[in-house]
Image: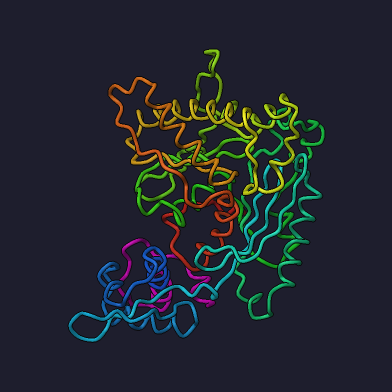
Amino acid sequence: MSERAGAAQAAPGAVLETSGGANQVRVRAYNERLVMSLVRRHSGLSKADIARRSGLSAQTVTVIMRALESEGLLIRGTPVRGKVGQPSVPMRLNPDAVYSFGVKIGRRSADLVLMDFVGRIRLQVHRTYPYPMPAPLLAFIAEGIAELEGRLTPQDRARIAGIGIAAPFELWSWAEEVGAPPSDMNEWRGVDLQAEIEARVSYPVFLQNDATSACAAELVFGVGPQYPDFIYFFIGSFIGGGVVLNSALFSGRTGTAGAVGSLPVQRRDGKTVQLLKIASIFVLENLLREHGINPETLWYSAEDWIDFGEPLEIWIQDTAAALAQAIVASASVIDFSAAVIDGGFPAWVRERVVVATRAAVKQLDLQGVVMPEIVEGAVGSQARSVGGASLPLFSRYLLDQNVLFKELA
């Protein structure tokens, strides 16, 4: 795997063999990534399908697939019969071929997952806290990786490609909203998170914004294949999101495209505030406190919320009204095919938010606006950690034009 892991990617379309050893290595590495990416995207393809979709010759595809199968990266599916000639044999990614760690650092909790080659979470550990601090979080990551490694065989540990970190940038911001002392949160200002983690582990480390990671996970493992252009909202402690254009994550001139939390919306009293001041889980926390309910139960497990009754319904309706405004504003600028809504909560909460948002949109002036389809995200509450875990896989094995990430030096 050394050539594949280390070779530079060829430009898209550079699929023909060229003269010169170095060029041949680069093109071969690109073609192998192209084949694996097509197989992943379509959940299995035959050699003929890959040749047709990639533009590679049948002979080249045969050679590549034999090599990938011999290395255990591809496995044979059930032959498809019923057509003239030999049965077609679809090839699939081997889920056990490669693993990666994904870390989500949130403002109330952290998750560490071990993900396989097809995006399934195999193992995970979870940690809650009133607010994140560098030393405890770094210890959690190092100890959590050691714990999960201890549950693997030596062969499985050798298949780990790296660690992807999904974290909010400028963690020291919004200390007041999460009830954290500014002096404590200011400790993050001098922390190089990637370097600190690299010093504690033996794997390559990648870093990406948490909302961008969630959007990337949705693009790759969720509804992304159905919608070439969509705006994405992930409701965490603070809402964030992303923009997908032509089936690729769009980061913009400064890398901040899709910062949906900053969108201006009106709240119930008519005052204009940023979307994150309404459609964020910290707002629900405050509502629960006002109703005499301990909000810490929100932090323990995103899948195990209870129905909090009136305060939850108030929050859902306010969130939906704000999301509706944000979606209409976004659709006025870009003709999105979908607006995807997900978050750090159970599927039944997500469904209620989406249904309420669709209803809220109907109350707005839509003249001249072609509305996107408003749909639920498919990845769920672990979207940020799944997106983080995908970074090492795309860096080493797959083409990354559908997931734009920044590997920080």
* Residue stretch rendered in magenta on the structure: 1-30
Q: Position of residue 315 (x, y in %)?
A: 58, 29
Along the horizontal axis of the image, is 106 left or right of 137? left
Q: Position of residue 223 (x, y in %)?
A: 41, 51
What residue is shown at x 79% (from left), y 39% (from top)?
187
Q: Position of residue 280 (x, y in %)?
A: 60, 33
Along the horizontal axis of the image, is 330 left or right of 165? left
Q: Position of residue 396 (x, y in %)?
A: 52, 67
Query: Where on the picture, by quarter, is residue 77?
Result: bottom left
156 drawn magenta: no
Q: Nearer the viewer, residue 140 or 77?
A: 77
What residue is shown at x 74% (from left), y 51% (from top)?
127
Query: Where on the picture, by quarter, is residue 120?
Result: bottom right
Q: How is the image coloured?
A: rainbow
Along the horizontal axis of the image, is 292 left or right of 346? right
Query: Where on the picture, by quarter, is residue 156?
Result: bottom right
Q: Nearer the viewer, residue 321 or 352?
A: 352
* Picture layout, residue 155 above or below residue 106: below
In the rendered picture of this protein, how many numbered marks are placed on residues?
0
What residue is shown at x 69% (from left), y 39% (from top)?
171
